[in-house]
Amino acid sequence: MKIYPKNKGFFKRLIPFAKRIIQICKKDKINPIIYGSFSHFYHTKDENMKVNDIDIIIPKKSFPRVISLLRENKIKFKYYSQWDTIVIKDGKLKVEIDGVGTGYKTLKEASLSKNIFNKIDFYGVKIRMITLKQLEDVYVVAYNRSKDDKAKILKKIKSLERFLGRKLK
């Protein structure tokens, strides 16, 4: 992929940081799946969009191992067990590792090991990424669950609807 989001300079610094986290996981046979704003950008190629972090999903059973790997590699992080989320930051650079959660039609814990995801080249690293249909599902569920970020999520939904030429279900 040779295009970049609107915040190209920042994003170019984010890529190696995200690749490092992804490679640490993959080296230990944990296969992360990219979702969130990068998957939105990847599918739509919307160069007016900003990608401020990289969001990945892993199986819940992999959280203890990922936490150990991050510690072994001296990478600072915060683990939010109530949300099944690990937030890894280096200044403004951020990678968020999440569990699948519940309520999705197209994305379930049991499906993480299946071959139902897009396979992409993330700037030199082979990785899986959610499909456009799964992204729709993620946005709808996130919007319905959100208490604080409804406006932000709605903006992403509207952008995706313009790209698709239809309303999300």
Image (cartoon, rainbow, N blue to C red):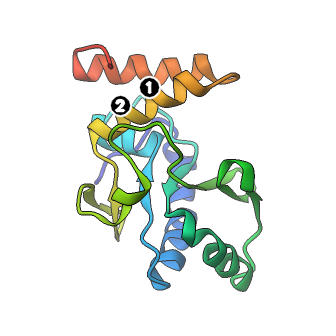
What is the quadrant of the C terminus in the image? top left
Asked whether, in this view, residue 14 is left or right of residue 149, the answer is: left
Q: Circle 2 — which element?
A: helix
Q: Which residue is the site of mark 2?
A: 136
Mark 2: amino acid: Glu
| x and y, in percent, of residue 70 in the image | 68, 76
| x and y, in percent, of residue 101 in the image | 53, 46
For the residues bearing labels 1 and 2, Cβ distance under 8 angstroms? yes
Query: Could you say which disc has been placed on residue 122 in the image?
Result: none
Viewer-side residue, 108 vs 29: 108
The relative height of residue 64 versus residue 58 in the rendered view (above or below) is: below
Residue at image point 52% right, 50% down: 11
Residue at image point 69% right, 73% down: 67
Mark 1: amino acid: Val
| x and y, in percent, of residue 142 in the image | 53, 30
State the separation of the CA atoms marked 1 and 2: 6 Å
Could you say which quadrant of the image residue 5 lies in? top left
Q: Residues within 10 Å of mark 2 (few under 14, many from 20)?
A: many
The relative height of residue 117 versus residue 51 in the rendered view (above or below) is: below
Q: Circle 1 — which element?
A: helix
Viewer-side residue, 98 vs 109: 109
Query: Could you say which disc has been placed on residue 140 in the image?
Result: 1
Could you say which quadrant of the image residue 152 lies in? top right
The relative height of residue 60 versus residue 24 in the rendered view (above or below) is: above
Q: Residues within 10 Å of mark 1 (few under 14, many from 20)?
A: some
Number of numbered discs visible in the structure rendering: 2
Residue at image point 61% right, 54% down: 96
What is the quadrant of the N terminus in the image? bottom left
| x and y, in percent, of residue 89 in the image | 71, 58
The relative height of residue 16 versus residue 23 in the rendered view (above or below) is: above
Residue at image point 40% right, 50% down: 108
